[in-house]
Amino acid sequence: MQLIEASALQPFLFTLTSEFRLMDSLNLPSILSPDLGLLFWMLIAFLVVFGLLAKFGFPVITSMVEERKKFIDESLTNARVTNEKLATLKAESEKILKEAHEQQAVILREAKTTGDKIIADAQRKAHEEGAKILEDAKLQIQAERERALQDIRGVVSQLSIAISEKVMRQNLATTEAHEDYINTLLDEIQPSKD
Amino acid sequence: MIRYLKWILVVGLVAMISLSAKASGSSHEDGKIDVKSIVLGHMSDGYDWHITTYEGHHISIPLLVIVKGENSGWNVFSSSKVTHGDTYNGFYINETNGKIYEKLADGSSVRPLDISITKNVVQLWIVVALMLTIFLSAARWYKKNVATQQAPKGFFGVVEMMVMMVHDDIIRPSVGEKQYKKFAPYLLTCFFFIFISNLLGLIPIFPGGANLTGNITITFFLAFCTLLAINLFGNKEYWKEIFWPPVPVFLKCPLPIMPLVEMLGIISRPFSLMVRLFANIMGGHAAILSFTCVIFIAFTIGIGIGSALTPVSLVLMIFMNCLECLVAFIQAYVFTMLSAVFIGMAHPEPHHH
């Protein structure tokens, strides 16, 4: 197998051989003189190792490591974004809470004013009602007094008539004329009605 | 951690003993120690995998020799047939440079076409097998597990860390955001090939020990691959800057001075990569081996000096090994980074004057 490979390379090797023979004739220590056989094997060995590793070795390793690196970078970015989102959410919730507090204060204030107003209204109404009742009572009292006065006047006029009759029984011819006269007198006596 | 350190120490000691044994095996019969040949011998490629020499017997793993001779055609035989100065089918190992030569009928020797499975080739395939095992099993982990759910732990965690370190710290910024994906597999392969080879090179016994990245052929190949990666994928602007760089016209019109300089740059950049890696690794190996040889040289002078110098040499060797572990990583890093930078420079953004 190796022989076949070698014979395929034969023309190439022979051209090189003449060069190397020249090198050999210089009689350098073997370490300094290039060796065709070693070069030949080095070519094959290096091509084998390079071919296999370039296809199945290094790219697999580097691409996987880069993939992992990308994944880690992405994870970090995601974490940052999530943190930022969390912070925004927190700020938002705080804002909502603050607004709620404000609203609560507003509502409380409104409730207080409304309550105050209701109380004030009620007081006012009660006041008005009281005043009205008082007025009515006054009117009624007035009316009652008038009626009482009327009654008293009636009684007084009757009494007066009776008294007058008794006083001047003989002087008074007609009852009716006397009655009118007494009423006139009473009107004059009575203090002015309002 | 303490327990691991203990093991590291034990392994280190065993390594040094084996190195010492190797070095002692290379000493000449007259008692003189040829440091140069020992050091070069340990850093060079070989047809067999020498383990140690025990009482004059070489203990080594024979490997496969594949050569095509001028008249005998393809020959495949065990290296044990030629390593002890024997000749097999007309093939023998030249002592001066350690390569196989063929003796022809007229008495002249020629270098045959040689694609033997040498020590470095075996080491090469060990590195390849290790890399395939490590990275394909790591890749299988990612296929089995959901990547977005968990990260790998333990060994695969280390693999991921290393791969992503190279990928994110070297390749992506150096090549440029736009096209780094296309070049990442090549540069990653490069990095781990060099890194694992460097580390295995520091282990003195069997699964490692061959001086792979300290071999000019290997670094030449890697640098050549980088040259191809730079120039085959360079964009229009890159070629424009080479053949018609933004410099005063007299520097490029009658005599293409700047284009020539730029073209020199095409070659010199990969060349510097090749030499830098090779020289660093070879130098490190040479230093460690030399410190080991100091022990034996000192003992040939006298037992007193030998015993006195051994601890010094040991400390220096341990220091050099630690340093080399660092260098193993740094050189892989530098090679990959410069390759990435050069590839990135081949994709310039068009200038708008």
Image (spheres, coloured by chain):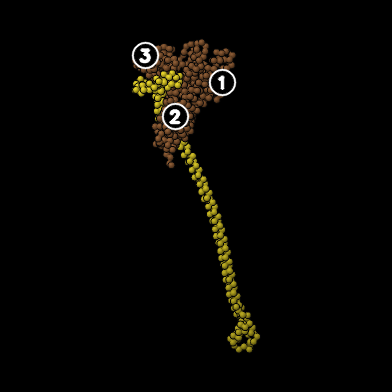
Chain colours: A yellow, B brown
Which residue in the protein does label 2 denote?
A: B268
Which residue in the protein does label 1 denote?
A: B315
Q: Residue at x 41, y 11 (%)?
A: B86
Q: Is residue B66 visible?
A: no
Which comes before the other along the chain, label 2 or label 3?
Answer: 3
Residue B68 x, y percent position in the rendering: 36, 17
Number of numbered discs present?
3
Q: Residue at x 57, y 67 (%)?
A: A128
What SS does tag 1 mark? helix
**Is residue B243 toward the left or the right of residue A142 in the image?**
left
Q: Amino acid at mark 1?
A: Val
Q: Amino acid at mark 3?
A: Leu
What SS does tag 2 mark? helix
Q: Quadrant of residue B314?
A: top right
What SS does tag 3 mark? loop
Q: Is residue A72 above or below residue A15?
A: below
Q: Amino acid at mark 2?
A: Ser
In this view, the residue in front, B160 or B50, is B50
Task: Name, please, the residue furthest toward the right.
Answer: A167
In this view, the residue in front, B193 or B113, is B113
Which comes before the other along the chain, label 2 or label 1?
Answer: 2
Residue B183 x, y percent position in the rendering: 42, 32
Which comes before the other along the chain, label 3 or label 1?
Answer: 3
In this view, the residue in front, B209 or B140, is B209
Answer few, some or many: residues within 10 Å of disc 3's Cα (few below 14, many 20 plus, some between 14 and 19). some
- Label number found at residue A50: none
Answer few, some or many: residues within 10 Å of disc 1's Cα (few below 14, many 20 plus, some between 14 and 19). few
Alpha carbon of mark 3 to alpha carbon of mark 1: how far?
51 Å
Which residue in the protein does label 3 denote?
A: B104
Residue B303 x, y percent position in the rendering: 57, 13
